[in-house]
Image (cartoon, grey):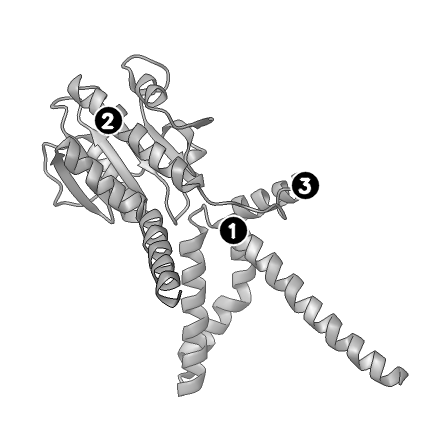
Amino acid sequence: MPFEDFTLWKYLATIVDILVVWYVIYKLINVIRGTKAVQLLKGIFVILLIRVLSGFFGLQTLSWMMEQVITYGFLAIIIIFQPELRRALEQLGRGRFFARSSGPDDDDQEKAVEAIVKATDYMAKRRIGALISIERETGMSDYIETGISLNAKITSELLINIFIPNTPLHDGAVILQKNNVAAAACYLPLSESPFISKELGTRHRAALGISEVTDSITVVVSEETGNISLTKNGELHRNLTLDGFRELLSAELLINTKVKQASSALWNWRGKSNG
């Protein structure tokens, strides 16, 4: 009987061990989710995959090279991921590492879209230049840190005031994160694509640049013409009408709401049919 209890305890301890390790890895992924470290992790996985395949097919030289990369790569990982490791330790010290993270509420998401559309309309009519980038799955914490932290609720009035000319925060980009204005006066990477029209300025190049390295949605209001543009996935949608802009922005940001509504309607229809 004692032996059976000991074996059961070992099984329970193994399960708890696996669950704890899984939870810690999950939280670490959340920490680096808002940084460029995600792309670096993909590179590491590719190296590991090459090492496994080279060993399987007997490619000795390539296998040896991957072994050297993996052996000495640990020090490189510490150097490359130094900002992310520091952020994780800071969150651990503040007790935020194990805090639950909640996604944006659907109602708040709709209000945010309307605030962006209203502010864009106001600035376009008055030819006030603006650059607004909206974080999605790929985090933008690295770019948020280049600006002035605000952490304020999204309102059209706030967005308009930020971009009023000759104010301290008007130069640079505003980054929206989880239905909040995370920061203003942020620096975004400029696109180096040779196919960009010469008539486009720095704002459009920055909007295209950030869309090439993240999945963000970026809104541009031209200071010269007042035209509204939107970038996503390295594509530039120029000279949008207000209705077209609202439709495109809603389609990108409110897709989760629409899916939930469709799922709820389907569930209700099934319930009535079964009844």
- Residue 8 against residue 42 in the figure, above or below: below
C-alpha span from label 1 to label 3: 16 Å
Q: Position of residue 112 (x, y in %)?
A: 35, 33
Q: Tell which of 16 and 163 is nearer to you.
A: 16
From the image, state whether disc 1 or disc 2 is nearer to you: 2
Q: Which residue has dot 3 on it?
A: 93
Q: Image quadrant for the C terminus?
A: bottom left
Quadrant of residue 265 within the rendered picture: bottom left
Residue type at the position of mark 1:
Asn
Does residue 46 appear left or right of residue 240 in this picture? right
Task: Please name the residue shown 29% across and 41% down the image.
Answer: 217
Residue most toward the top?
A: 166
- Residue 231 against residue 13 in the figure, above or below: above
Does residue 153 appear left or right of residue 92 in this picture? left
Secondary structure beneath disc 2? helix
The label shown at residue 120 is 2
The label shown at residue 30 is 1
Q: Tell which of 204 and 20 is nearer to you.
A: 20
Does residue 17 appear left or right of residue 79 in this picture? right
Q: Tell which of 59 and 208 is nearer to you.
A: 208
Circle 1 crowding by C-alpha within 10 Å: few under 14, some 14–19, many from 20 = some
C-alpha span from label 3 to label 2: 40 Å
Label located before the other in sequence (1 or 3): 1
Contact between labelled residues 3 and 1, with CB atoms less than 8 Å apart: no
